[in-house]
Amino acid sequence: MQSDPHTPFHALQTVSLSTAARHVVPMRRRDFLAAVACGSGVLSGCSTTSGPVRDPSPTPEPTPPPEVHTLTEEKPLPTPDGVSNEAAARSFVEAHERRYVYNELVGGFGTAQPATEITVEPTDAAVVYATDAGYYLLSTCRGSAQYYDPDGASRRARRNAASVAHFVGSDVHRRIPFDAYRCAEPIVTGSGEGERSSARFQIYDFETPPNYDQPDQSGHEVDVRISDAAGEVVLDRDYRTSLPLTVQPRVTRTTGAYSISVSTGGGGQVQHDWSLSEPTDPAWWALVVLITHSGGVTVQTLYPNEVVGLPSGSLCTRLGNIGASRRRSDDVPGR
């Protein structure tokens, strides 16, 4: 069975919305990664609240007394054995995400004391694309935990694993959360303009294992060209999918009909009509170039509903115009 391993966030250059200090480390050709360790709102993330801050002390915190029930054991994650239809794929994702969130709450996000109570809500999941090889889904699962405090203060944590993308086939599962990704340089710039007033698209790679140590290597080379109804080129760039998810923010602020042409280094090609009308239309933010688990390419809008659909905002706008994808005119070694 193939599985998408859980990679700790410290393996990435990270940005945390829960802290005042935001660390951005420039990478070659100004590529960078945005990762949310503790997000809020519609973004996947977690949050913690604790009691009063105490002075640091070399003395370890006391362990819970025997009469206090604690939760310290993680639950084994299920495997997609014999998944052969949409219902089975959805059932697998629902079970997987509940245990995944439970295990994260057991870990406590750095909390020194064990959990005394964990609650995980039922998973919302929807199939967004079906192929002969398997199914692509989006899911959202939320949970919370109470942690032991020797002083009796309230220590709680919440986990919101929202808009997580999955591929599920027979004995195969890949999981790509919407909380760690490479941001590409915006096409449209200007002060005071947010992402919600402009269109964006994402590139998901379900075939290439993530390479967080060398994010400029491996993966697919994906060429994307977008033209408006008059034939004027709006975007003409190439991207490398050594990471599972790339976000291209601020493509355009103009409503109308657009044509997207996508090709990959492996010979895959697809064209798609992109219509942008009302700003509340998910086409403005949920368009996806999808590298399938078998290496093909398609373009889909991943927004089956507001619970699991891709969020209308991303960290790429919050961080400003820092990140950049490789432009077609760049001299990229090894091409």
Image (cartoon, helix red, strand yellow):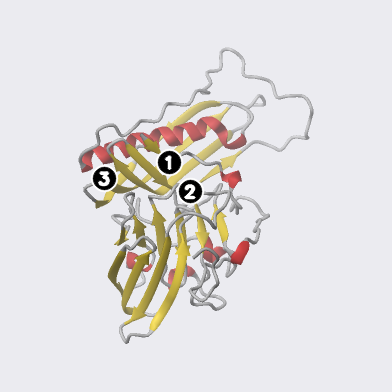
Mark 3 in CB contact with mark 2 (< 8 angstroms): no
Element on which disc 2 rests: loop
- Residue at the far bottom: name it: 230
Q: Position of residue 335 (x, y in %)?
A: 49, 65
| Residue at image mark 2 | 210
Identify the residue at image location x=43%, y=76%: 235
| Residue at image mark 3 | 134
Q: Position of residue 218 (x, y in %)?
A: 49, 54
Circle 2 crowding by C-alpha within 10 Å: few under 14, some 14–19, many from 20? many
**Is 48 in front, or is 208?**
208
User: Hey, what amino acid is under mark 3?
Assistant: Gly
Identify the residue at image location x=41%, y=68%: 223
Task: Reply above or below: 170 against 264.
Answer: above
Q: Is residue 19 left or right of residue 129?
A: right
Mark 1 in CB contact with mark 2 (< 8 angstroms): yes
User: Hey, what amino acid is under mark 2?
Assistant: Pro
Q: Position of residue 64 (x, y in %)?
A: 62, 19
| Residue at image mark 1 | 4
Circle 1 crowding by C-alpha within 10 Å: few under 14, some 14–19, many from 20? some
Element on which disc 1 rests: loop
**Is 273 in front, or is 138?**
273
Q: Is residue 315 left or right of residue 203?
A: right
Q: Position of residue 69 (x, y in %)?
A: 52, 18
Q: Rounded to the nearest whole Å, what is the CA distance between mark 3 and mark 1? A: 15 Å
